[in-house]
Amino acid sequence: MKFGAVIMTAASALAATSTAWEMTTWADFARGRFEGLSLSRDGRLTLAPKLETLFASGQPAVWTMVQGPRGEIYLGTGHRGELHRVDPSGASALLWTAPEPEIFALAMGPGGVLYAGTSPGGKVYRVENGKATEYFNPGARYIWSLAVGRDGVLYVGTGDQGKVFAVREAGKGEPYYDTAQGHVTALAFDTGGRLLAGTEPNGILYRIAAKDKAFVLYDSSLPEIRSIVPMPDGAIYVAALGGTIAKRSASALSQGAGAAAQGAITAPTTSITVTEEAQAGLDLRPKQQAGQQPAAQAGAAALPVIQTVEYAGVEKSALYRVHPDNTVDTLWTSKEENIFDLVEQSGRLLFSTDGQGRIYGFAPDRKVTLIAQTNESEATRLALSPSGLLASTGNLGKLYRLTDALGTAGSYESPVHDAQSVARWGRLRWRGDVPQGARIVFRTRTGNSARPDRTWSEWTQAPASPLGAAIVSPNARFIQWRAEIAAPAGASPVLDSVSVAYLPQNQSPAVRAITVTTQLLANQAAAAKVMPAAQQAAASYSITVTDTGEPGASTASGTPVQTQSRAGARQLTIAWQADDPESDQLVYSLSFRGVEERQWKPIRSNLTESSFLLDADVLADGEYYFRVRASDRPSNAPAFAREAELVSAPVLVDNTPPVISFSSGVRANGRFEIDFEAADGASPLRRCEYSLDAGPWTVLEAADGVTDSLAERFRVAIENLSPAEHLVVVRVYDAAGNAGLGKTLVREP
């Protein structure tokens, strides 16, 4: 039977603000946590093949594994260099503990002879009948890879010299090929028995046909060739990663950090820096730091910690197919996960990554399926066995077995969703197919920290409902859902999509600043604004001067006295800055009150612009506050709309010029002196100047030396005033820019 619901993106009453978080694609689901579930490329969750823990090593990582002639599995671990044997039944035994802390490579030779490569101070040991003896010491720091040819010759891939050695008997090995790279990270044989070698840091795949004779099959854009799988048809599958060869140990280092602090593990640090020389294929062997003990002398507890440079602008890992004609196809890439190993099973590729220890399937149609997730840091190696696929892991060094039979139960935990603010939760809806006898149960939890912790609510089951399940978790900013799937053996429900409807808490807008400025209108515009039309017509006149010198005809019956308008009418520009954290549309209301007044008087409401022009004449002289209120009601339901306000600093409105009063002039000390007073009712005086007989203006200062008060006394002293009648004009400005004018006549006999 099928269940489903239309995804709710808005409620009828809250159409502008309700939203839904929907998960329906591969990319949506891939970010979650899988337990017993698989994910198809088209974004469908189903029960996965049964994944069982076959063995736990108790070590931070299982680096390598190889299958013995009787189906037993041998595992090499770090950071104590243990070699374990695990039978198909799960029974295990510790065979040997190496003097070196890491076993990075294992290989099975003829007759069940096992070879183990250790690091650092790399050596190869031969393990036979439970006894390990040193077999070959190449003088290299690391042994990364081992492979046994058809003739029984053991090939050893080393670092940090990047050489391949051929070992034909104990203690007798010779350099087989020098790659001029830092590390030989993978070895295998093609169908013709030729050796294949993958390297780091240039990610080159070599085919070595004979001693010192090689051909580059592919030069990857990624730093490391991690795994090589030859096919019977001559094709070669290659896994490359863009992290580092140290990635296989980096995740486990965090587990070993505590032991290191107790003296159980100590390590010099080797740095591999990718430079232009590296890209050119030059030798990049790490340089020993001054005073650093060589690896071979560092003791059994030495631990390799390799730091490398990240590669910007490239994929993190890739899967290639090298065809028999040497052409190459890129089958799969990822910017999020490193690919660690791959195997071929019945025409399908299986590969493992460090994305929570995942195992993917790659079908011939190039569709990728997430088959299983171990929830470890990385799935380091894969191997096929008669009982199923085997996967070793790092972070916790375990061996898992993936059977062909489907599990009967599993769960999926979604990534955490951020609603950006505390949200009201609506319904959880889903779409899928549930066979008879199967079930899907959903649970949710919420919290206000980005990562779920003990401050989050408990998992709460969402009640079943044909219209979706109402979420009962507390209102919060973050939410996570979980699906628990169960079914009889052989059947699997399918989950196609899940959506969570919610209403984020509306956040208040903010008014950041208010600016009030005064400006003057041009004379004509001011006159047109303040003078009635009839008065304008009566006051207008023109005078035409002809070439005879006679005045032309007047446009009026007489010549009236010309009345000069004020320099300009004043306007207040009130501007403000406001914003909304959710980019909601805002409307504004503007009001004012005098400094000594109590109630706000509205000027204008429902403004959509962030400025307003106000004639200053409508306000009497004095100081005023202006208030701006911003509301996000155009984008929210009335019950959830929010507003904010800001009040300006006191704004001085002064439309009246200073008043000037003269005293009589007197002659004293050979000059003529005129005293006068200037006063303003609103703002302090700022400037004073006088003109004699329409001459240039001369600046005056107040009698007390500074022009800065509402009322000031001034004195005009005129030297060498000639006997005659003279006009003295005085102009005084206040702080608002208003100019007061006064005149007096001086008659000298």
Image (spheres, rainbow, N blue to C red):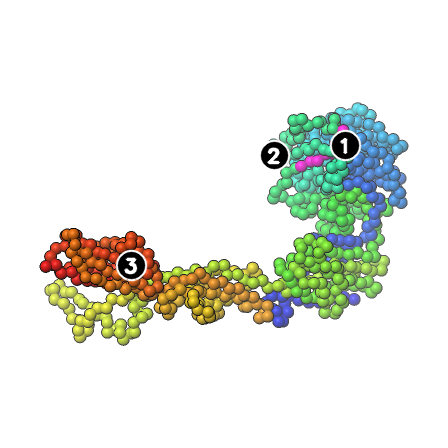
Q: Which mark is residue 477?
A: none
Residue 584 placement, left or right of 160: left
Residue type beneath disc 3: Glu
Neighbours of disc 3 within 10 Å: few (<14), some (14-19), many (20+): many
Q: Nearer the viewer, mark 1 or mark 3?
A: 3
Residue 674 horizontal/vertical position (percent): 20, 58
Residue 745 horizontal/vertical position (percent): 17, 62
Residue shown at the point (46%, 67%) measured from the top left:
590
Stretch of the chain drawn in magenta: 299-307
Determine if residue 439 is in view. Answer: yes
Residue 221 placement, left or right of 702: right
* Dot 2 or dot 1, earlier in sequence: 2
Residue type beneath disc 1: Ala
Residue shown at the point (78%, 53%) measured from the top left:
35
Residue 535 horizontal/vertical position (percent): 26, 74
Q: Which mark is residue 712?
A: 3
* Dot 3 or dot 2, earlier in sequence: 2
In the image, 730 versus 47, the foreground residue is 730
Q: Which mark is residue 275?
A: 2
Determine if residue 612 is in view. Answer: no
Q: Secondary structure at mark 2?
A: loop
Q: Nearer the viewer, mark 2 or mark 1?
A: 1
